Image: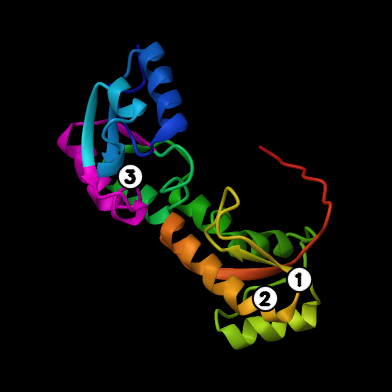
Amino acid sequence: MALFRKILIANRGEIAVRVIRACQEMGIATVAVYSEADAQALHVALADEAVLIGPPPPRESYLNGERILQAALALECDAIHPGYGFLSENAAFADAVAAAGLVFIGPSGAAMRIMGAKTSARAAMAAAGVPVVPGYQESQAEADLVAAAAAMGYPVLVKATAGGGGKGMRIVHRPEELPPALDSARREALNAFGDDRIYLEKLIEQPHHIEFQ
């Protein structure tokens, strides 16, 4: 017997397709969501039901948690699968889903608040005695960021606090490159994650990536 009867997939593209196909193998009904630009997308065609959630900009569709939750409730879903990106690391959305009596297929809002934002994750790791890359996250003011970068030494990396997948990141080699990099990273972060906060890290060139799951 399937754990859920019906799941809404709050995403698009390959991840939505994979979740839908996995649900089909498990006998779980699926609901796709889509923006006006994705009406003919594969995930829409594959799902048992599909709901239009807004215009093309992600912040008006795939980042609109209230609209997505309303769709899940209206179609009597048991759970919401966020995929990756978009609302998958949004603690408020995870809490809202749980408060509405549905299951959020992912970490709890409490866990996300600690580890979801890079700045709070860095703080938690530092508090636990884990070495972290030198950085600056105390202020969003451009003057403070410029001063911090100078003190840290170039090159530095501008990173979106709520970022993932390389979005909202800019490598900066010289002081004059920093202000436009901050503006560009903020715009991309706001569009991709609904959060324009950024912070700085010292750039480590040719690093080794070690990931724990």
Q: Earlier in the sequence, mark 1 or mark 3?
A: 3
Q: Decide: marks 2, 1 in contact (CB < 8 A)?
A: yes
Splitting the image into 4 quarters, where does residue 104 fall? top left
Q: Which portion, as a residue range, is magenta?
A: 53-81
Q: Which residue is mark 1?
A: 173
Marks 1, 3: nearer the viewer: 1
Amino acid type indicated by mark 3? Ala
In this rendering, the answer to whether 182 lies above or below 91 is below
Across and down, in percent, residue 87 comes to: 41, 48
Is label 1 in a helix, a strand or a loop?
loop
| Residue 74 shows in this picture | yes
In this rendering, the answer to whether 188 lies above or below 96 is below
Q: Residue at x 49, y 61 (%)?
A: 189
Residue 68 colored in magenta in the image: yes
Label annotation for residue 177: 2
Q: Taking 103 as reference, is 204 left or right? A: right
Across and down, in percent, residue 128 comes to: 73, 59
Q: Which residue is mark 3?
A: 98
Q: Taking 84 as reference, is 8 left or right? A: left
Numbered-mark total = 3
User: Marks 3 and 2, how far apart in space?
Assistant: 43 Å
Is label 3 in a helix, a strand or a loop?
helix
Q: Residues within 10 Å of mark 2 (few under 14, many from 20)?
A: few
